[in-house]
Amino acid sequence: MFTLHIRDIAAAGYTSAAGYAFEQLNPNSIEFKDRGSADDMTKVPLAIDTKTVIHTTSEKFLSLALDAGIMLHKWETFDIRSPRLQTLARGLRPAILRFGGNAADLLLFNRSARCPYVAGQPVSEEQIEQWENYEKYDKYDNFTMSATDFDVLNKFAAIADWLLLFDFNVLLRNGSDWDPRNAVEILKYSIEKNYTHHLAFELGNEPNGFKHRFGWPLEGDQLGRDVLMLQKTLKQDPRFSQFFADSIQVGPDVTRPPRSLKFLKKYLSVVHNSLDAVTWHQYYINGRTATVSDFIDPEILDYFPQQVDEVKAAVREARMPHAELWLGETSTAWGGGAEGLSNAYVAGFMWLDKLGISAMTGISLVVRQTFYGGHYSLIDRYLQPLPDYWLSLLFKRLVGSKVLNVTTPVRDRHTLRVYAHCTATSR
């Protein structure tokens, strides 16, 4: 698979990647050649429509996530004072940093809580050894985020020049309705600390799976009413409206279809056009059973565009023409990723293909799970960049927001995967 980044196709000439070559045939056509012997060249014509932009992605199209579970299991290893960490993070700006995951619906904010450790303090080798396994907890208990924890999170977002998307705990309930009191405390503290300019919000993480995960079902229409309550708090409460009236609000961050579609449709029927973006999650395979061949299997890769179509159909049915479509959380394999695969070279095939398909099918923003933490992270526990970090950096540097249409012969469509963008102009 390749992503062509084009400033002026008439000047594109002849370029190559990964043992293949592209040769311009005319202003609207590029020929693909397998670089074999001179007498044995496979030629595949690629038609690129350079006159029409089929989609324009957000400038933050490639964005990142931190799982809230990091505060439970390895927050102390995340040294925001590290020049290496700061440089790696800034390399991926502009971006959104989503702070969510399953643990977000267990998080309680208490500004007076004592923080047992501070991110960046020296840690033992034993603590570091626990780093990879933080997602494998089976007991779900509430935990407290201190003011210091929240400070670290916001300072890191500011250092990286990222917008912070904070996921409020939706399992705090007052009868059948969401209880916003803890969220109000977070908002009040954010105003005091002047964090308001880089905050965006969502409510709940994969709520369609609450019955399975927590033993407590939540219906889509009820979550819709909860979201309207959050929106009223942000935009109409005089304590907060002057700071948060224009803040981005997204949701519902459901799991991949078709299992989530019923929940999503009921949710959208309530929220209507009150969201800036409709968000959903997508993973291809189970991290505990994944094999290396899964990562380059065209049939597995083809699950994703089918799922995009199903979500887009639900949004169209809800008549939300102005809401963007975001992948609110995504990577290769669920369950924390596949050890030795999701953080290795082979994962790049899934990652690049997902970015290409997302842009081509009208998704405006893709949140990669995760920047740090788990087997699918972009940097390891020693703050060293992994293969997908370098792909993400190249994407940020080279690939622009304007998406062009590419067509290939039917016989090659599944194994030859090509995506075209105009060149990034902001670098």
Image: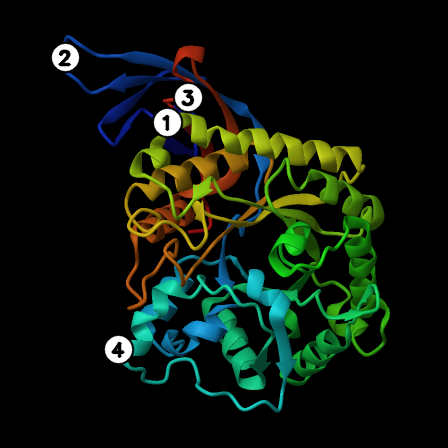
In which quadrant will I find the N terminus?
A: top left
Regarding residue 264, the answer to whether it shows in the image is: yes
32 vs 311, nearest the viewer: 311
Type of the residue with mark 4: Glu
Give the CA separation, mark 3 to mark 1: 29 Å
* Dot 3 or dot 2, earlier in sequence: 2
Disc nearer the start of the sequence (2/1): 1
Mark in front: 3 vs 4: 4
What crowding class fits label 4: few (fewer than 14 Cα within 10 Å), some (14-19), or many (20 or more)?
few
Q: Which residue is mark 3?
A: 414
N-terminal label among 4 and 1: 1
Mark 3 or mark 1, earlier in chain? 1
Q: CA distance from mark 3 to mark 2?
A: 26 Å
Name the one closer to the observer, 276 or 29: 276
The residue that appears at 75% across and 33% down in the rendered structure is: 316
Cα–Cα gap, marks 4 and 2: 55 Å
**Residue drawn 34% across the image and 60% down it:** 379
Q: Which numbered disc, 4 or 1, marks the residue closer to the eye? A: 4
